[in-house]
Image (tube, grey):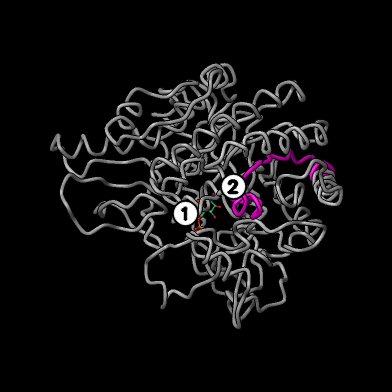
């Protein structure tokens, strides 16, 4: 279908992954353990609808480290990108990717997080990956921290609850900026920085049972992450003057269930709590509604002299976010629906994925417009996609029309938002190649244009195969989003 031109000529089309979900090789090349190396796969029959990623206490962590018969830690094996990156990048290039979002695994560079010297083997690995991308003219978009906190920092400091992590992170950031300054022009600091509120271990490396006041610990950790992020922005600008560095939010567009002002207020409060993170990182200061919230909850943040200046003086160049679904908030107590973090009630106007995530392409346009109004900085959608069960037909084809429908509807709405004045600079669909799910550690929750032959238990040849959506997306990029 042809329509009025929508996307700018230099629009950054591509796909997104994270080291912990694709690399595998968890104990190769000198890599240390990361937080997600400790999270087990639990079959749906046992876990029900709960998404539980967090390790909560020292004892639990000790037991996981000791191991037991039948342990299954899927993020330790990923999809073996560590050894197959050349083949995978060749496939991304065939689709015409302009950019590829990936993360650097912090414990590949600093295995314990607090060494004085980086691990050369880890640095060399990413050199090879970036060179391979650049060979095809694919711009790397690199997340510094995508749920890959070195485990030692959890054991030693209880993660970001301790301010020591700020300097350790900035040292890591400066190390990779310096090393890759000629190769990487697009950076992100923390993936989905708001996740800590729902998952303190994954977002901030906190064993939550070890602290007295949970909320206090989480917001204090977040303060440390905001400072670390701002200092990374400063370092990036100094070390790579022509680079752009952004923040990253798990965006949760929230609708009120009805026009009852009580519902509207609840929805607004949820929305503010979600935008709090980008308020700090884009505007450079804590919004007043959050300071009131801290007061109400008796949360006292420990801020050092100079913190406010750091936040204000080193705001991000662009705002990136993930968008999978929208939410509905109600002032009534009701049965809640599933979501990645926030749980709301069912939206009768929307269909949901097999995991209960409510599919809402127009919500993406709404969110783009709302965020651009609020912040007036370039926006980048760095995650969006449909997690689904894919089936290989007898002829070997994977006909993922449902995925094409999902992506097409979302890209259409992006185009509309651009026409309506939003400055959107790129789109990297999530899990452009099948990978291990963050939330459930399943392999069977697939997002890719490329199928990977592996099951939830690690059986399979790991062979890569193009799905029907592969050629579809290739054409989307080739026509710069005109043919969907
Ligand atoms: C985001 C994360 O929360 O959503 C990704 O940044 C994650 O790492 C993605 O994979 C999809 O979630 P899930 O649970 O389906 O893997």
What residue range appears in magenta? Answer: 133-157
| In-image side of 193 versus 28 (left or right) | left
Say above or below: 421 vs 167: above
Quarter of the figure with residue 450: bottom right
| Magenta region includes residue 95 | no
Nearer the observer, 371 or 45: 45
> Alpha-carbon neighbours of circle 1 within 10 Å: few (<14), some, or many (≥20)?
few
Say above or below: 36 vs 259: below
Query: How far apart are the alpha carbons under marks 1 and 2?
Result: 11 Å
Residue 94 makes an appearance in the image? no
| In-image side of 317 versus 115 (left or right) | left
Residue 363 is situated, as x and y percent measured from the top left of the image, at 37, 41
Say above or below: 87 vs 415: below
Residue sitting at x 44%, y 42%: 217
Nearer the observer, 401 or 454: 454
Q: Which mark is residue 157?
A: 2
| In-image side of 251 versus 177 (left or right) | left
Q: Which residue is mark 1?
A: 210
Say above or below: 138 vs 86: above
Question: Going from the N terminus, do you reach mark 1 or mark 2 first?
Answer: 2
Nearer the observer, 421 or 168: 168
Within 8 Å of ligand 1, the CB of disc 2? no
Residue 323 is situated, as x and y percent measured from the top left of the image, at 46, 44
Secondary structure of the residue carrying numbered label 1:
helix
Residue sitting at x 61%, y 83%: 69
Q: How many marks?
A: 2
Secondary structure of the residue carrying numbered label 2:
helix
| Magenta region includes residue 138 | yes
| In-image side of 236 versus 124 (left or right) | left
């Amino acid at each position: 279908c042809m329509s009025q031109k929508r996307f700018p000529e230099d629009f950054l089309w591509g796909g997104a992954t994270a080291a912990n979900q694709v690399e595998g090789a968890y104990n190769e090349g000198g890599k240390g353990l990361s937080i997600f190396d400790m999270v087990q796969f639990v079959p749906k029959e046992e876990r029900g609808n709960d998404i539980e990623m967090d390790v909560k206490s020292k004892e639990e962590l000790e037991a996981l480290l000791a191991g037991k018969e039948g342990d299954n830690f899927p993020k330790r094996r990923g999809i073996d990108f560590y050894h197959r990156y050349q083949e995978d990048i060749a496939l991304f290039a065939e689709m015409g990717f302009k950019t590829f979002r990936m993360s650097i695994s912090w414990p590949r560079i600093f295995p314990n997080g607090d060494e004085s010297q980086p691990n050369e083997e880890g640095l060399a690995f990413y050199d090879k990956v970036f060179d391979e991308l650049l060979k095809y003219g694919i711009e790397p978009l690199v997340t510094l921290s995508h749920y890959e906190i070195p485990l030692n920092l959890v054991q030693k400091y209880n993660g970001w609850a301790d301010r020591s992590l700020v300097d350790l992170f900035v040292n890591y950031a400066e190390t990779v900026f310096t090393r890759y300054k000629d190769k990487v022009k697009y950076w992100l600091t923390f993936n989905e920085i708001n996740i800590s509120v729902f998952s303190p271990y994954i977002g901030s490396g906190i064993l939550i049972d070890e602290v007295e006041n949970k909320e206090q610990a989480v917001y204090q950790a977040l303060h440390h992450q905001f400072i670390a992020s701002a200092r990374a922005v400063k370092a990036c600008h100094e070390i790579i003057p022509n680079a752009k560095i952004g923040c990253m939010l798990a965006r949760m567009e929230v609708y009120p269930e009805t026009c009852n002002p009580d519902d509207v207020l609840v929805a607004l409060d949820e929305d503010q709590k979600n935008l709090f993170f980008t308020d700090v990182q884009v505007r450079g200061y804590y919004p007043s509604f959050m300071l009131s919230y801290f007061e109400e909850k008796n949360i006292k943040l420990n801020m050092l002299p100079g913190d406010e200046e750091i936040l204000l003086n080193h705001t991000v160049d662009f705002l990136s976010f993930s968008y999978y679904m929208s939410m509905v908030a109600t002032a009534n107590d009701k049965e809640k629906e599933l979501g990645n973090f926030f749980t709301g009630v069912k939206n009768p106007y929307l269909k949901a994925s097999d995991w209960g995530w409510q599919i809402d392409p127009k919500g993406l346009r709404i969110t783009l417009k709302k965020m651009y109004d609020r912040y007036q900085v370039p926006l980048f959608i760095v995650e969006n996609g449909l997690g689904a069960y894919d089936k290989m037909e007898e002829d070997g084809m994977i006909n993922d029309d449902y995925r094409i429908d999902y992506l097409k509807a979302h890209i259409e709405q992006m185009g509309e938002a651009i026409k309506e004045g939003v400055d959107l600079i790129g789109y990297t669909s999530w899990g452009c190649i099948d990978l291990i799910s963050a939330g459930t550690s399943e392999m069977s929750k697939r997002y890719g244009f490329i199928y990977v032959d592996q099951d939830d238990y690690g059986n399979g040849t790991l062979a890569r195969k193009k799905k029907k959506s592969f050629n579809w997306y290739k054409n989307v990029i080739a026509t710069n989003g005109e043919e969907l």
